[in-house]
Amino acid sequence: MEEQIVAYAKRLKLSWIKENFNQVEADSHQEYLLKLFEEEVKNREERKVNLLLKQAQLPKTGQQPFQWEHIQIPQGIDRATIQNGAFIHEKENLILYGGVGTGKTYLATLISLNAIHRFGSRVKFYTVASLVNKLIEANQQGTLQKLIKQIEKLDLLVLDELGYIPLHKEGAELLFQVISMCYESKSIVITTNLQFGQWNHVFGDPVLTEAVIDRLIHHSHLLLFTGESFRYKESLLHE
Ligand SMILES: Nc1ncnc2c1ncn2[C@@H]1O[C@H](COP(=O)(O)OP(=O)(O)O)[C@@H](O)[C@H]1O
Ligand SMILES: [Mg+2]
């Protein structure tokens, strides 16, 4: 009989029940069944979150709570909506602007984590450089459409570090293609150390730059990170 139960559980894809059904104790049939269902669902949700986390490829973060003191938030959005990722439901974008070590990457990562845990959102974290490299490579290998389709399925695309390196023409155009595709269909969180006036240096072409900014600032919130570098503070503490 056990073998049959295992076989049925396998066929029905009840992987927790398949492994654990004979360890569950209960006083009635109903209680037993309920426990099996509860554990199966819990396990399934955990696996889903783990898969989403794996796919998101988030950078490692510290454990310290996020400090908001030196971050200016515009009207129309609040800390909670930002941090818990709820802006994703409205397909809004965030632009996190400020100097090095002020918490842009950290906040983008926390938002991603919360969106995955709370809403089961499909998130992908790229540095601009890594995405552009990937796009160029895919374009050369004829797999660009496949990559674009993967990005299309996301709820949130994080683009970290716009502005650290200038892009070549092909890279700039491909990045524009991705940003246009995301426009109004999903959220982008972008971190940058450059004011809009300097984005020209990244995209190389004023018309393309304007088109990118136009897409991004529509439905977006600009957060200013005005603090000192935490990296600097932390290195002082550890001396
Ligand atoms: N606002 C903040 N609250 C808490 N920790 C922070 C904050 N900003 C930075 N840190 C700490 O400093 C580290 C570096 O910040 P990071 O997000 O990489 O800066 P940026 O991306 O703006 O250069 C973070 O991993 C975190 O440990
Ligand atoms: Mg960063």
Image (cartoon, rainbow, N blue to C red):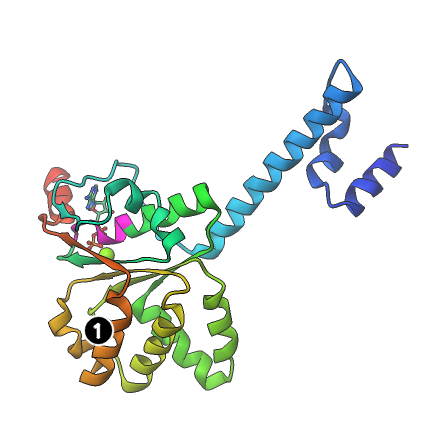
- Residue density around tag 1, few if under 14, some if 14–19, many if 20 or more, within 10 Å: few
What's the residue type where badge 1 is placed? Ile
For the question of whether residue 205 can be seen, the reply is no
Give the left or right position of residue 86, taking residue 105 as reference: right
Range drawn in magenta: 101-107
What is the quadrant of the C terminus in the image?
A: top left
Q: Which residue is mark 1?
A: 165
Tell me where residue 73 appears, x and y as whole percent.
17, 48
Quarter of the image holding residue 216? bottom left
Membership of 105 in magenta stretch: yes
Q: Is residue 112 above or below residue 14?
A: below
- Describe the element under mark 1 as helix, strand or loop: loop
Tell me where residue 98 appears, x and y as whole percent.
14, 57
Quarter of the image holding residue 164? bottom left
Number of dots carrying numbers: 1
Tell me where residue 107 appears, x and y as whole percent.
27, 48
Q: Residue at x 22, y 78 (%)?
A: 209
Identify the residue at the far top of this view: 27
